[in-house]
Amino acid sequence: MKNIYIIPIFVPHLGCPYKCVFCNQDEITGLKSKVNEEYIERTIEDYLKTIPQNAHIEVSFYGGSFTGIPLEIQKKFLSITQKYLILGSIDAIRLSTRPDYIDEVILDNLRRYGVSIVELGVQSMDNEVLLKSHRGHSVDDVYRASKLIKEHGFTLGLQIMIGLPGDNRQKLLETADKIISLKPAFVRIYPTLVLKGTYLEKMYNNGLYTPINLEDAVEMSKELYIKFKKNGIDVIRIGLQATDDININKDVVAGPFHPAFGQLVKSSIYKDVVEHILKNNDIKNCTVFIYINPRSVSTLVGHKKRNKVYLESKYEIKINIIQVDDVKEDSVLVEYDGNIFKESIENYIKNPLYNLKKIFIKRRI
C-alpha cells in the first residue's frame, strides 16, 4: 500500500461570509498572505521536490469554504491542480467546504476539474448548537449536501467538533449517529479551542462559555472514534494540528489543546485493550510481558507513562514491554504464565460484547 502525502493549499476565509464563534482561519492555517495561482503552483512544486517516488499524492484545499469562492476563481485555482493531475504528478484533488455551498452546478464544475474528494465542515447535527456557534447553515443543509455529493460520485468526508456552545454529551452522540446515517467515507474530530481574535474568546472572557477540559475531550473523542470505527467509517484525524501559533501560550487562550491530541485518544484505547485482557483473564499480582510494535510503544505506555502506571497499580502487576517488529501496529500481545493473549484495536472495537457504558465515564460538556 502506497504512503499518502497531502499537499495543503490554505484558502483562509475566501468565499465565507460567516464568522463562526470559534473561527480565526488566519491563525488556524498560519497563513495571512493572499492566495493566487502563483502561490498554488509554487506550493505544489516545493512539495513535489520532497515527496518520495511511488507515493500517493493529493492536493488538498483547506479553509472550509472553497466552493463559496466565485466560480471563476475556483476554476483558476483548480486548473493549476488539474494540470498536475493530468501529468500524473499527483493522484487526487480534494477540498473542504460548507454544507450550504453545495449544489449541482458547483459539483459539476468540481468534477470537470478532477476533484474526487469533498469534505463538509458539519461541526454539529444539532440546530441549536449550530445557531449558537454562528455557523449560518442548518442540519437540513448537511443532509442535502451529503446526498448530492455522493450522487455525483465524490468521496464524502465530514468534520465535527466537540465542546461547541450549547453542546453536551447527548447531543454529541446524536450528532455521531446522524453522521453515521450519512455513511461518509471518513470523518475528522476536532475539540473546540478558544483562539485569540474570535468571538468565542469574548464569550470565554465574559463567562458565557466554558471549554471542556482535556481529559473529558479525550474521553468524548474516544467514544466518537469507536462509534465511527464500529460502523466502518475511517477517522483520519483527531485534534487540530499544532503550529507556531496554535499552541499553549500562543494563540490558544483556553480549551483542550495538546500537540498530540490524537495520540492521547488512541493511547486511552490501548489502555482499555490491555485492561480488557487483564480483567477477563483474571491476571494480577504477577509479571506481565507485553509485545508491541516499536512504533506503538509510546502510545501504549501513555503520556508520562500514565497507562503503565495505572495498569501496574490497579492490577498489582509488573509490566515488561518488548518491542517486536512483526507485531502489527494496532495489536498487543500479553504474555502471562506461559499463555499469550492477543488483541487488536480493530477487533476489540468491533467485539459485540464491548460495552461502552463500562468503558466510558459519562460526563456532560
Image (cartoon, rainbow, N blue to C red):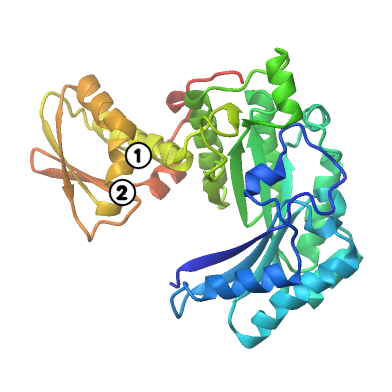
Relative placement, left or right, of 312 versus 3 is: left
Q: Quadrant of residue 127?
A: top right
The percent position of residue 22, horizontal first and vertical second, equals: 71, 33
Between discs 2 and 1, the one toward the N terminus: 1
Instruction: Look at 80% across and 46% down and name the residue there.
Output: 142
**Residue 280 or residue 196, whichever sits in front:** 196
Instruction: Look at 30% across and 31% down and name the residue there.
Output: 304
- At mark 2, the secondary structure is helix
Which residue is farthest front?
A: 33
Quadrant including the N terminus: bottom left
The percent position of residue 96, horizontal first and vertical second, equals: 72, 56
- At mark 1, the secondary structure is helix
| Residue type pointed to by label 2 | Ser
Q: Are marks 2 and 1 in contact (CB under 8 Å)?
A: yes
Q: Examine the rendering and report whether any part of residue 68 can be seen.
A: yes
**Residue 235 or residue 75, whichever sits in front:** 75
Q: Is residue 328 above or below residue 128?
A: below
Q: Which mark is residue 296?
A: 2
